Amino acid sequence: MAEPPRFTPEQIEQFRTIGLSLDADGKLWHQGQEVTHPRLRQAILRWLDVRDGGRDIVRLDEQRYAYIDVAAEHLRVTSARWVPGDDGSDHLELSLDDGTTEELAYATLAAGDDDALRCRVRGGKLRARFSTAAQQVALERVEDDGAGPRLRAAGATWAIAQS
């Protein structure tokens, strides 16, 4: 039986560069062609991760991953809704364009120069940008106490940073 070929670390790095990119509008591209198949796109978005060194990747497991160029945020918050929490206060639940939902990480909420809200998702690893519809839901609970805008949620008020 023939031994499998052995590759150098340099060759493996070349194999990981497969031409994946995510543009600022959230469109996914592979070698210049837009990935339009909904389930394939969603799967790739779910595999998004960031290596310890900060490089964006799509990860299947610890050994198998490929590089992806991300122009802006990794994900988009497509919708948001207020849900009652166990503590009796309302919590903001986000729906992401990878098909997952999670509670807003309130301390990561920021407004960009374009006034769009952004936050961190997946335990702070990835950046997400709010859609207009999702942002309108979040803004229902924003107040300005003279020290800048703050979101009232999860039993506290959270400063909205400027990024």
Image (cartoon, helix red, strand yellow):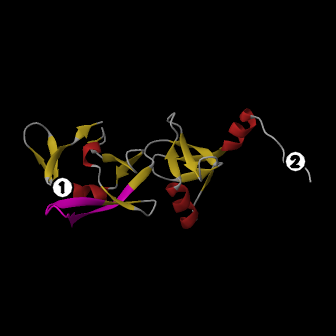
> Within the magenta stretch, is there residue 87?
yes
The residue drawn where x is 72% and y is 33% is 10
Residue at the disc numbered 1: 154
Query: Residue 114, which numbered label?
Result: none
Say left or right for 3 vs 59.
Answer: right
Label 1: element kind: loop
The amino acid type of the residue labelled 2 equals: Glu
If the image is split into quadrants, where does the N terminus sit? bottom right
**Along the line of sight, which residue is nearer the eye, 18 or 53?**
53
Q: Is-magenta flag for residue 157?
A: no
Q: Nearer the viewer, residue 16 or 2?
A: 2
- Taking the view exactly as shown, the residue that stands out farthest to the right is 1
Q: Position of residue 133 (x, y in %)?
A: 29, 60
Residue 31 x/y as whole percent: 66, 48
Does residue 43 sit above or below 156 in this rendering?
A: below
At x 54%, y 60%, the residue is 43
Farthest residue, direction left: 145
**Amino acid type, mark 1:** Ala
75 sits left or right of 131 in the view:
right
| Sequence-wise first label, 2 or 1 | 2
In this picture, which residue range is highlighted in magenta? 77-93
**Local crowd at mark 1 within 10 Å, few (<14), some, or many (≥20)?**
many
Q: Which circle marks residue 3 in the picture? A: 2
